[in-house]
Image: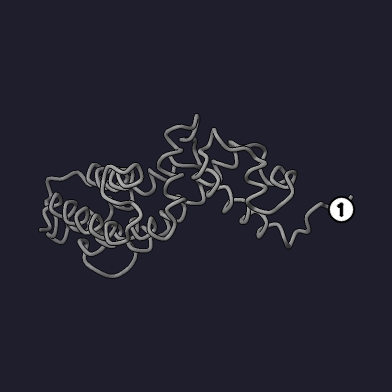
Amino acid sequence: MPRAVPPDDEPEKRRAILHAAVGVFAEKGYHGCRIADVARAAKVAYGLVYHYFRNKDELLESVFAEQWAILVNALDAVDQGPGTAAEKIGSMCAFVFDAYKASPSAVRVLLLEVSRTPNALRAGSTRETFETASRIVADVVAQGQERGEFRRSIDPILAATSILGALELALSGMLVGVIGAAASEEEVDRVKRQVSEFVLAGLGAL
């Protein structure tokens, strides 16, 4: 029996569903949305969503995994690229806030829905990628310590998780309105500069 979806169309259709899911989850929340809402936003048949995802849990986890992979790949590219350790840490901080400006819905889903969703920290989703991200940032901190840029008394992994935590809480503060006007690019840039300064000062770079 032929497949309902031609194989060549599958990656595009799956991406369309994931993209739509980000917007729907951000607008309605995980518990407030239905698969039908995602299908409608993606402009695909209701049953096609189940062609790629067993249920809403798997769809959300796929959104988490894809978005976290983007972050990890960006952090790794900075780590492997040129520049001082301080410049790399600054670039990592900048990427996170620039990603928020480019796709606030994706950041909202990552930061707000993960804490509300059972089993959201399963391997292959945010737990595994958080550990990977921590190791990458810790590597940059260690580079800075070896070059005399950062204080040697700081544990690199502790520093890395603290940096990622500061970024997460600053973004969450904007999302819920505790910090400034979340919709203003100028405000996001202000927070980006101050968080970078705060992080580098803690490392002993300023």
The amino acid type of the residue labelled 1 equals Pro
Q: Secondary structure at mark 1?
A: loop
Of 60 and 144, nearer the camera is: 60
Residue at the extreme bottom of the image, as rendered: 82
Of 77 and 10, nearer the camera is: 10
75 on left or right of 147: right
**Image quarter of residue 8:** bottom right
Determine whether 94 is above or below 54 in the image: below
Q: Position of residue 109 (x, y in %)?
A: 46, 44
Q: Position of residue 179 (x, y in %)?
A: 26, 46
121 on left or right of 168: right
Q: Position of residue 51 (x, y in %)?
A: 73, 45
Of 39 and 164, nearer the camera is: 39
Report the residue at 49% width, 45% height from top: 26
Residue at the extreme top of the image, as rendered: 118
Q: Position of residue 181 (x, y in %)?
A: 30, 51
**Image quarter of residue 84:** bottom left
* Mark 1, other Cα within 10 Å: few <14 / some 14–19 / many ≥20: few
Determine whether 32 is above or below 41 in the image: above
Report the residue at 33% width, 68% height from top: 81
Colour theme: one colour
Say which residue label 1 marks: 2
Report the residue at 27% width, 42% height from top: 178
5 on left or right of 56: right
The total number of labels drawn is 1
Of 69 and 197, nearer the camera is: 197
Which quadrant does the C terminus fall into?
bottom left
